[in-house]
Amino acid sequence: MSDSDIQTADAVIVGAGFSGMYLLHRLREMGLKAIVFEAGTDVGGTWYWNRYPGARVDVESLAYSYSFSSDLEQQFEWKERYPTQPEILRYARHVADRFDLRKDIVFRTRVTAATWNDDARDWLIRTEYGEAVTARYFIMATGCLSSSKMPEIPGLAAFKGATYHTAHWPHEGVDFTGQRVGIIGTGSSGVQSIPVIAEQALDLTVFQRTPSYSLPARNRKLRPHEVTDMKARYPEFRQEQRESGAGVPVPIPTRSALEVADAERDAVYEAAWESGSLVNLLSSFTDLAVSQDANDTAKRWIHRKIHEIVEDQAVADDLCPEYPFGTKRPCLDTNYFETYNRANVHLVNLQRTPLVEVTEKGIRTSEREYEFDAIVYATGFDAMTGSLTNVDIRGRDGLSLRETWRAGPRTYLGIGSAGFPNLFMITGPGSPSVLSNMVVSIEQHVDFVADAIGHLREQGLTTIEPTAEAQDAWVDHVNEIASHTLYPKANSWYMGANVPGKPRVFMPYAGGVGEYRKKCDEVAAKGYEGFALAV
Ligand code: N01
């Protein structure tokens, strides 16, 4: 490739989801030329790809939305409390149109490699089609849950029927009417899709390795006064979001679950369950995330609920999780546990009868073969690091991000990594990200990155890169906080436990978005303390 074939830009952004879109807008406002590469055919990221039946967000629409534009806040009309995937995609498209974003987004194109050139002080970014762009700043806005995974069992290609992964659902939808369907996976995607598929299919068999904690979403249309009230108090509400623990304002608990009488504790759990909000239950007492005994009270209470809803008590037993509540991502559902009361739904407990293989006709466990017309894989993602290490990123002296992170991701603030100048990650490992309302965390990171780039330009500087010392201290801090919680007790994707061979490290920052924001603000105020800046 000759030099004339290489495009130049100030910044290359990978991904046109909520992060990439806002980042493009911010950088363009600052006068930078930014190019976004996006593998899909449209904007929306997660909400572009995950079109499975029943897909919804589990943060309320009025809170799961951008705050950067008051006009956008005031003019967009959300319809439901928990919007469906099509409604969120409509919002993303609306944002793209409103801010004229598409003209700088190259769709249907994956970035495959990025190499830092220390002489030129820029990145050379390559796509799957061999295109190349040089840019001073390279930003991975690739999302935390974008690199999907299949189960690690033989015979995946042998099945003669139709197969689907929840994260790559056909745009035209799927009609399961009259079909025998098998679904593997009971995380959020499984929990949301199982009730909808069960209503359509002739027969649905659910293969469950680990049960999920799930609460009823109590979704409904938004009332006009709810929308009007929120629109009137948005500035105040946004501030509360930014200062909260998970990007969703809730009263801060003051009591231990162990210091109240059983009846009172049950009433608190009941109210949270009825509210249809995960954070209400997660933050009902001070110690659910840190004390096994406290957490056991929530666990036992939810087990009781499952046993009340599910008629067959042996099935209810199988649906009760044993790991501490909240240590794997809990779900919000519509009729999930009720679905197991249907005659056409069957639960296979893979703890008792593990998967052996996929066959021509269906799925074989250690007990027997099940025959299907279609198999749905709701088997999740190589979370947080997968989409970053899938690109061959080479920093200073050819340093490979993939190799450097072999024993687990190492970042400063979840934004940068030592040895990779001018590489930024939006909601990377080591930041609150997946433990929070993603839009709140995305906006905070985008603002931090855009401000850092603005600072470099104002000061006549060209590079910014975490120091090894600051990064080591941050990684220690992230681990230290996690070690005081119950999170490491579960085999979760937060721990990398769902991907065989992935190092077991708790990846997100569990200190809360408010505290984290304060830390980032301090870092910026001190001239980007912990980063080395150079001319
Ligand atoms: O993926 P998951 P997901 N053999 O990893 C099972 C967000 N999200 O797509 O738990 C057998 O949670 C696996 O079993 P186990 C949300 O953050 C949000 O459902 O590893 N089973 C598990 O049951 C969520 O947490 C929303 O033992 C295998 C399932 O597949 C995240 O995305 C909606 C297996 C995977 O569950 C990921 O959710 C959807 C194997 N080899 C997603 N491999 C909302 O906002 C995997 N499994 C509502």
Image (spheres, rainbow, N blue to C red):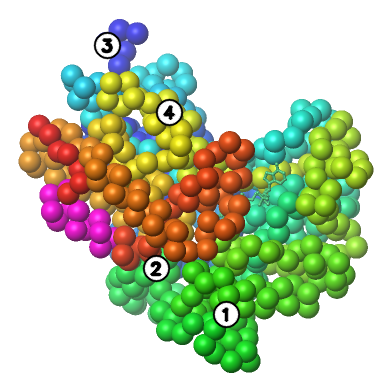
In space, the residues marked 3 and 1 are separated at their CA atoms by 61 Å
Q: Which circle marks residue 403 in the picture?
A: 4
Residue 241 spot, x, y in % from top left:
36, 69
Residue 27 occupies quadrant: top left
Lower position in the chain sequence, tag 3 or tag 2: 3
Q: Are marks 4 and 1 in contact (CB under 8 Å)?
A: no
In space, the residues marked 3 and 2 are separated at their CA atoms by 49 Å
Amino acid bearing label 4: Glu
Q: Does the segment drawn in magenta span residue 520? A: yes
Residue to which mark 2 is pinned: 245
Amino acid bearing label 3: Ser
Circle 3 residues within 10 Å: few <14, some 14–19, many ≥20: few
Name of the residue lying farthest toward the left: 459
Q: Is residue 232 visible?
A: yes
Horizontal side of 308 relative to 500 (left or right) equals right
Residue 168 spot, x, y in % from top left:
62, 40
Q: Is mark 3 within 8 Å of ligand 1?
A: no
Q: Which circle marks residue 4 in the picture?
A: 3
Query: In front of the other: label 3 or label 1?
Result: 1
